Image (cartoon, coloured by chain):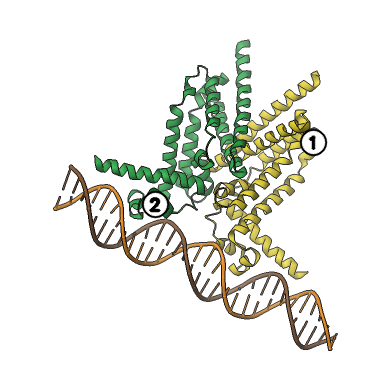
Chain colours: A yellow, B green, C brown, D orange
DNA sequence: CGAACCATACCAACTGGTCGGTATGTGTCA
DNA sequence: TGACACATACCGACCAGTTGGTATGGTTCG
């Protein structure tokens, strides 16, 4: 299986490098040659593994999504014993992840979709899937923390889950504009307070009942 | 003054077209030739008015910011007679502006900064200025609605003003990912409810006192 | 077993087209 | 007449993708 391993290594190396460069420069400004040079492979190898630059971008979004999914799935906030605690723990982790350089902490899907949404439908769809899929992991806990259920309750929870993603994506934009992640931390704090207040109101209603 | 007028016309026509194309495709994917063709001018005219593509992008961000400033300065929400009413009126206007095609309603600064923040410092700075300047127009009313004052109160209001911009920027990203502005409306609704709740709490405290 | 065959992984050089930018000419108006 | 506002034609660098090949390791069959 040496061949399979080598193949995986090279492909993954290209994807890791592409992930970094795409987050730094965006899709249009990232040259295939740059990726090849940074990954230490030739262009022939690149086009052996990926049909086109667009196919690479697609794979990179999925690669990014997979990595993020693994990261959050294995995080400790799941051990909190209330739904509200888990959601606030999730946000605390998101804030903690803001340490580090901007290209390492921002969302590839959010970055690329702005360039791609009108011109590259496949990339747009992959970005949408990544963001929506991540938001979806929050829905059950948000619904439970709000004390809602049924289709309508789930819809409300889903709207809030997407709202959290909007805040985080917007926080990244402000961070990029300001050239530092500080503002993003403040945004996540504000979001945490907002959600805590919503969960608190829900809990009080529940207790009263 | 015919020459001055013609000059202004051409320059403005280029800027208007560039604004549209940059919002549709981003900086990297927008060709100077595309802009020239769409504006009905030749390349010579383009480079007569702008030193480089980057200079055009810079001017386009400022052009966008100027237009937005004019739009919001002349809006009717300023006639609301409470600070909270004006802020919620502002958000209602932002929601109303979501009608129309995505490239027409999204923020050029937020779109371009993602591509430019690492590679084009001048563009990043112009985007930052546009976003921060717009947020700044909200600070006095937010501070008043929160019933805070002094340097610390203003800082709190400024954080909230930036938070509103983060939500709106993030809402645009989700809208682009989903291919429709509906989600952005939901995000602004959530933000409105959050702010209304904050203002309400502040008001109650004030009354009690 | 081992020779013939084949698929996979990768490489280096090249190509055809694109794109930002320039050099130079032309018409117009004060 | 000269300064300004363009137009035309062109350049050189760049860049996604191709081509024609090699090296390696696995599979088949006598």
User: Is B98 rendered above or below residue B202?
Assistant: below
Point 51% across, 46% down: residue: B24
Of A191 and B9, which appears nearest the observer?
B9
Judge by depth and name the residue closer to the eye, C5 or B69.
Answer: C5
Q: Quadrant of residue A202?
A: top right
Near-viewer residue (A64 or B184): B184
Q: Residues within 10 Å of mark 1 (few under 14, many from 20)?
A: few
Q: Which residue is mark 1?
A: A80
Please report the residue visible at 27 percent of the width from the left and 41 percent of the height from the top.
B4
Residue at the spot of label 2: B36
Asked if residue B148 shows in the view, the reply is no
In this rendering, the answer to whether B78 lies above or below A111 is above
Between marks 2 and 1, how big is the CA–CA gap? 58 Å
Residue B143, visible in the rendered structure: yes
Give x and y (percent) for residue B93. Answer: 52, 28
Q: In screen coordinates, is B154 left or right of A125?
A: left
- Counting from the top left corner in percent of width and height, residue A186 is at 61, 34
**B138 horizontally vs B44: left or right:** right
In what quadrant of the picture does the N terminus of chain B appear? top left
Q: How many marks?
A: 2
What residue is drawn where x is 46% and y is 44%?
B20
Q: Callout 2: helix, strand or loop?
A: helix
* Left or right, residue B66 beside residue C3: left
Element marked by disc 1: loop
- The mark lying in front, picked from 2 and 1, is 2
Q: Is residue B16 left or right of residue B23?
A: left
Badge 2: residue crowd in 10 Å (few <14, some 14–19, many ≥20): some
Where residue A140 sits: x, y (%)?
Answer: 77, 36
């Amino acid at each position: 299986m040496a061949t399979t391993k080598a193949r995986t290594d090279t492909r993954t190396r290209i994807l890791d490098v592409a992930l970094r460069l795409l987050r730094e420069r965006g899709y249009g400004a990232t040259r295939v040659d740059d990726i090849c040079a940074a990954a230490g492979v030739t262009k022939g190898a690149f086009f052996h593994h990926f049909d086109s630059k667009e196919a690479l971008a697609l794979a990179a979004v999925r690669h990014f999504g997979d990595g993020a999914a693994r990261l959050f799935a294995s995080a400790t906030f799941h051990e909190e014993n209330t739904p509200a605690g888990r959601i606030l723990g999730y946000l605390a982790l998101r804030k903690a992840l803001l340490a580090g350089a901007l290209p390492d902490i921002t969302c590839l899907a959010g970055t690329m979709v702005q360039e791609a949404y009108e011109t590259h439908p496949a990339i747009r769809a992959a970005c949408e899937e990544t963001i929506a899929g991540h938001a979806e992991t929050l829905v059950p806990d948000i619904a439970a923390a709000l004390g809602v259920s049924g289709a309508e309750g789930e819809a409300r929870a889903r709207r809030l889950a997407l709202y959290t993603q909007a805040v985080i994506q917007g926080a990244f934009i402000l961070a990029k504009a300001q050239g530092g992640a500080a503002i993003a931390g403040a945004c996540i704090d504000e979001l945490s307070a907002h959600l805590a207040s919503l969960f608190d109101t829900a809990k009080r209603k529940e207790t009263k009942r």
